[in-house]
Amino acid sequence: MIESIQVIGARGRVGSTVSSRLAERGVRLDAADRDLVLLCVPDRAIAEVAAELPLGPWVAHVSGATPLSALAPHMRRFSVHPLLSITKARGPEQLDGGWAAVTAESTDARAAGFWLAETLGLRPFGLADERRAAYHAAAAIASNYLVTLRKVAGSLAESAGVPSETLDPLMRSVIDSGFELTGPIARGDWGTVDRHLDAIREQRPELEELYLALARVTAVLAGRELPGDAVSPGVGGRR
């Protein structure tokens, strides 16, 4: 049973949120007599910090990308990665109901990782260490690239004289609808896609390559065959 945890990096986004939740749940945050040392530090610092810790307590990190080998020489180790975008603007309630990837090398470590995730209000699932890169790439696409798409779409909206924030309810509604695909590519409306490209080339030409790449992938998802003269670069005199 883990009764006392030392959180290293407790002033950061994840560390402060985790510390607040652990305190809410009655877990002692004790640097002297701890059962677990939880590293909430930048990925690049995990190995260095872990190497300086005395052997004995459990040692864990909250990184999605860093393998457990970074916690050497500790063998009582695991990781719990909250699959969320955590911000200091909100409190520990932002953890509630989120998922968490738990990577462990033993039954005891898995039990400790699942206990920590559930204590934080997260829903744990197991993640093999060797599959961590693919998992983290998926997380980056779902979160980081969403920010990129919002910025890109906002720029196009502003070029049409429309406030970029009008797109926010639309993006939320896509999530709320279970990511049901709608729009011109789902309908096979290539004339509208061509008009999109005309507007992009006129207003934001630097976005054409991104639009085309996304259009091709979306066509595959929609089960549509992309006409070569509609959205293929250099075809039909479009460039």
Image (cartoon, rainbow, N blue to C red):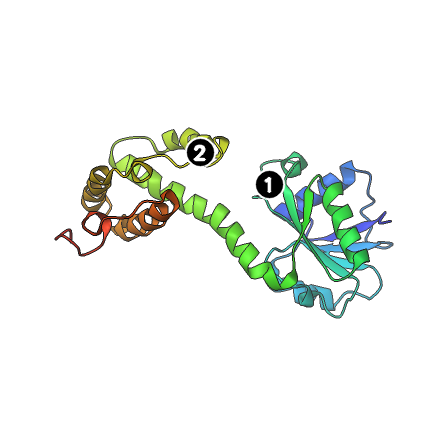
> As rendered, which of 14 and 72 lies closer to the eye?
72
Q: Which residue is at the far left?
A: 237
Residue 125 % position (x, y): 67, 48
**Residue type, numbered disc 2:** Val
Q: Is residue 138 left or right of residue 81?
A: left
Q: Is residue 160 above or below residue 83?
A: above
Q: Is residue 227 left or right of residue 20?
A: left
Q: Earlier in the sequence, mark 2 or mark 1?
A: 1
Residue at 85 percent across and 55 percent down: it is 32
Residue 42 % position (x, y): 61, 58
Residue at 30 percent across and 36 percent down: it is 187
Residue at 47 percent across and 50 percent down: it is 141
> As rendered, which of 30 and 226 lies closer to the eye?
226
Label 2: which secondary element: helix
Q: Which residue is at the far bottom?
A: 73
Q: Is residue 203 left or right of residue 221?
A: left
Q: Is residue 177 above or below residue 12?
A: above
> As rendered, which of 60 and 9 lies closer to the eye?
60
Foreground: disc 2 or disc 1 = 2
Structural distance between the alpha carbons of marks 2 and 1: 26 Å
| Screen quadrant of the C terminus | bottom left
Residue 146 seen from this side? yes
Numbered tag placed on residue 88 in the rendering:
1
Circle 1 residues within 10 Å: few <14, some 14–19, many ≥20 = some
Label 1: which secondary element: loop
**Residue type, numbered disc 1:** Lys
Which residue is identified by label 2? 174
Q: Is residue 107 left or right of residue 80?
A: right
